[in-house]
Amino acid sequence: MATIVGGIATSHTPTIAFAKDAGKQQDPVWAPIFEGYEPVKAWLREKQPDVLLYIYNDHMTAFFADHYSHFALGIGESYGPADEGGGPRDLPRIQGDPKLAQHIATALVADEFDLSYFQGKDLDHGAFSPLSVVLDHDREGWAAKLLPIQCGVLQFPIPSPRRFWKFGRSLRRAILSYPEDIKVAIVGTGGLSHQVHGERCGFNNTPWDMEFMDRLEKDPEGLLDITLAELAERGGMEGSEIVMWLMMRGALASEVTCTHKTYFLPSMTPIVSMILEEGADRAPEETDAEFRARMNHQLAGVEKLEGTYPFTIERSVKGYRINHFLHSLIEPEVRTRFREDEEGTLAAADLTDEERDLIRSRDWIGMIRYGVIFFQLEKLGAVTGVGNIHIYAAMKGLSLEDFQKTRNAAITYGVAGKEAGEAAK
């Protein structure tokens, strides 16, 4: 069974990344940053977690206001540093854990949390800034996998502190019920007191920061009814990021011991880290077997439906490349290039040979079995002049005419827009 080895709370200010990348480790002005993180680095080396469950918020880099979820679970195979305007940092990609993500997603949805899922997105300083100074890495990779949870804390309304805490409690149950023998460390990032916008920018409140850290360890549930407005008053508008620390704390045992705490305020944001060791915890209300049965209740028996392929996280991760390519056909320039030079377009795409063969052969049922969601097949059909009815017939192994006989009318249609109409003129 999976084990939670403890938790880390940390700031994620880009100041940390700047100091590291600029080689400021021995500069007396900057050295306290690195000194504060040495115990965290040593703790991770000692505990050797297989996975860091990493709670962070993106800063309108990979997640923008056109789609900004409250809770987005990373399900991808790997993540790289995002380009935030000056080029990505010189860091290796870090491996994800899609299998653990599938388990956690199933558990959280069973506990009635509404999630979104992401892959193919890079992570900004909210993730990589502190990660780069605490987790061992080289050109070949990192000492642990990363399972990111992006929390939408910048665009209001956002969930309450209590909701973040409850999310953490469900995360704990999900992790501890995972049937594989892995070790997981919980990392909560963000905070503490700071404000980076408006005339109040530069606001800090060190006494509140100290109080919060003490209560996070000893009485976290006493923090849950403080409103977001009150958190902003005490710690600055962006300082309300500490709800992510509450999620981390919720994922730990009821009793913890703080074995490390550091606080340094060089600029706009205090650079803070804590280590929380696991202690006694309340017994769960369900056995692991009962919990897993509840997790899987909604899809129990779906595997018996012949010719049915639920688009699960596992299938989404496997089929990401080909789904991503087919989705790109919504872009006019990609459609034009594909129609004029299909082989060249496929050769230049990030696809395996098997995926290219599935597309060029128009193997509709083969693509479904592989992990393509049907609504990407529609896009390929629209570009190549193949209607939905033709695709349905092919998936069933029937001719168009024989499939139409199973309907009330012999019609054809597709999702192609005005381009199809113009081509038909």
Image: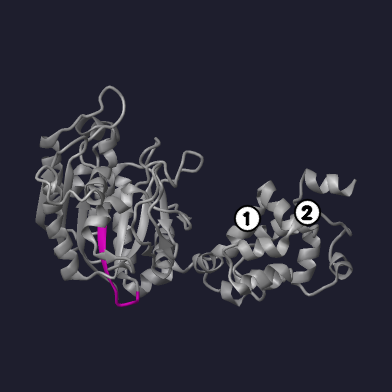
Instruction: Give the percent coordinates (x, y) of residue 245.
Output: 24, 49
- Horizontal side, residue 10 vs residue 306: left or right: left
Whole-percent x, y for residue 17 in the image: 26, 48
- Looking at the rendered structure, the kind of residue marked 2 is Gly
Q: Residue furthest top?
A: 199
Residue 232: quadrant of the picture: top left
- The magenta region covers 179-187
Question: In which quadrant is the C terminus drawn?
Answer: top right
Residue 145 picture location, percent across and down: 33, 66
Image quadrant assignment for residue 394: bottom right
Q: Between 180 and 123, which is closer to the camera in this rendering? A: 123
Mark 2 lies on residue: 414
Taking the spot 37% from the left edge, 54% from the top edge, the residue there is 149
- In front: 116, or 162? 116
Instruction: Tell me if 195 is positioned left or right of 375 in this view.
Output: left
- Mark 1 Cα shell of 10 Å, populated few (<14), some (14-19), many (≥20): some
Q: Is residue 308 above or below residue 241?
A: below
Residue 327 disc label: 1
Q: Residue at x 59, y 68 (%)?
A: 371
Instruction: State the residue at coordinates (70%, 56%).
Output: 379
Quadrant including the N terminus: bottom left
Q: Is residue 184 magenta?
A: yes
- Mark nearer the viewer, 1 or 2: 1
Q: Is residue 222 above or below residue 237?
A: below
Q: The residue under label 1 is which amino acid type?
A: His
